[in-house]
Amino acid sequence: MATNKGDVKIRRMTEADLPRIKEIDKELVGPHRSVSWPLRIEAHWWVYRTLPNFVAELNGEVMGFILGDIRGVEYGTEVGGWIDMMGVSPRCQSLGLGRKLVEAFCKECQGRGVKVRVIVVSEDERLVKFWKSVGFHKGNLVSYEK
């Protein structure tokens, strides 16, 4: 487990980062992830590779990622930046990598004049706490199911 922030670098994601991103996702979710999930990461990259996708390197090794896009008026909202997937290796959590990834994504979106949104399960207290700690607040979208 990493014990300090070391040399943290946030940079744009490249295609060469995809295998490591899948490894981090597997570290986080374990064997319970849908078989199609790695394909979704690949598809996201090929569709949105020019948009705000970043990785966090710690001492030269990719230890976190954030994937998102900027899209239009779904759900009656304005054009906005949407964070779709994010992960930080369990070995490096609580070192600020997630915060730095979110800051990079938000800076990119602010430069384009759009707000940033993320959707989480409201019962996931850990994620809700994280998003609040990086300045997000509950929006006006509500999910209904049948």
Image: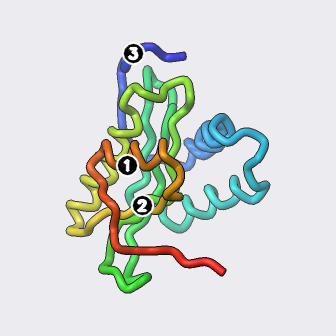
In space, the residues marked 2 and 1 are separated at their CA atoms by: 9 Å
Give the mark toward the camera: 2 or 3.
2
Residue at the disc numbered 1: 131
- Figure check: 108 above or below 20: below
Image coordinates of residue 143 in percent, x first then y, are 51, 74
In space, the residues marked 2 and 3 are separated at their CA atoms by: 28 Å
Q: Which amino acid is tagged 2?
A: Val
Where disc 2 sits, the SS reads strand
Label 1 crowd (10 A; few <14 / some 14-19 / many >=20)? some
Comes first in the chain, label 2 or label 1: 2
> Residue 74 appears in which quarter of the rendering?
bottom left
Find residue 118 and name its label.
Answer: 2
Where disc 3 sits, the SS reads loop
Residue at 53%, 68% (x, y): give it.
Answer: 47
Position of the N terminus, as image quadrant, is: top right
Find residue 4 and name its label.
Answer: 3
Would you say 124 lies left or right of 68 here? right
In space, the residues marked 3 and 1 are separated at their CA atoms by: 22 Å
Label 2 crowd (10 A; few <14 / some 14-19 / many >=20)? some
Q: Which amino acid is tagged 1?
A: Trp
